[in-house]
Amino acid sequence: MAVASASLDAIAAKMQEHDIEKTVLLASYFPHKQSGISNYRLLHWINDRLDWNDGHSQFCMFGSLDFEHYFYQGYNELEELAGQNALQGIKIYTSYQHIDLASEKMDLVARLAAKKYLLLMFHVGSPYTALRTPEPASIANTVTPRDVQQVAQRHPDVSVIIAHMGMPFLDDLVESVKANDNLYADMSGLIDSKYDRPEIPGSIEAIKRFVGECGSKRLLFGSDFPVQTHEDAIAFIEKQV
């Protein structure tokens, strides 16, 4: 990784350095790697930093769940957290798990997002970090933007985010976003800031094309800290003008 620590203190320091008011933290479930940060553990970290005098926090949270193995336990937890107004969104780790986007389970999560006014995000594509290794980029089928748009079409009242600009499927991303008003992309994790320096010009051009064809309001700023640094993510935006 390009940065030694991804603690909330380290993130807060970067936020102050770059005048960032709010950061979204993502709960993560990677059972195949026996790693991840659970919803309540992440919420506990956020609450530990809460200024109880004014109720203000620098951080907000997207929850997630082990969709493949413990779906209903995870869904019930998300429903409980949403009832506490502890979530701003839900991220689904497609490609890292076998998830049927056309299933009733997927629709159940999407209906929860609609009911509680939550954003719904999907891991999409294969970042350079994964493509650098001889091992498969994911343990399940790679999901493309065109795959995700079916969820956006079935649930037009939910704002759906395609993470990492769905790279390397840029053509697919542009066409899918243009065809669906509730579909967005984020620019997080386009590179590994430590290893992928030669890929920076290509990432900048990808952002320019997306903004040119889809508009700046359809692209969310993001870093994927500590893999892609704040400095690189900000530079991607500054070089658009």
Image (tube, rainbow, N blue to C red):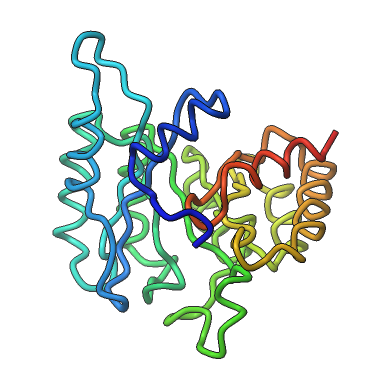
Q: In this view, does 175 lie to the left or right of 121?
A: right
Q: In this view, does 11 lie to the left or right of 189?
A: left
Q: For the view shown, which residue lies furthest in the bottom direction?
A: 134
Q: Nearer the viewer, residue 157 or 98?
A: 98
Q: How many tags in the picture?
A: 0
Q: Is residue 66 left or right of residue 233?
A: left
Task: Please identify the quadrant where the C terminus is shown.
Answer: top right
Report the residue at 20% width, 31% height from top.
47
Report the residue at 68% width, 49% height from top.
177
Q: Residue 34: where, in percent of width, then height?
A: 25, 74
Does residue 85 lie above or below 166 as drawn?
above
Does residue 151 lie above or below 67 as drawn?
above
Report the residue at 17% width, 46% height from top.
40
Q: Which of 197 and 39 is in front in this view?
A: 197
Q: In which quarter of the image is residue 234?
A: top right
Q: Residue 27: where, in percent of width, then height?
A: 31, 51
Q: For the view shown, which residue lies furthest in the front direction?
A: 4
Q: For the view shown, which residue lies furthest in the top direction?
A: 53
Q: Residue 31: where, in percent of width, then height?
A: 27, 73
Q: In this view, does 234 lie to the left or right of 118?
A: right
Q: Quadrant of residue 17?
A: top right
Q: Residue 213: where, in percent of width, then height?
A: 83, 45
Report the residue at 32% width, 23% height from top.
57
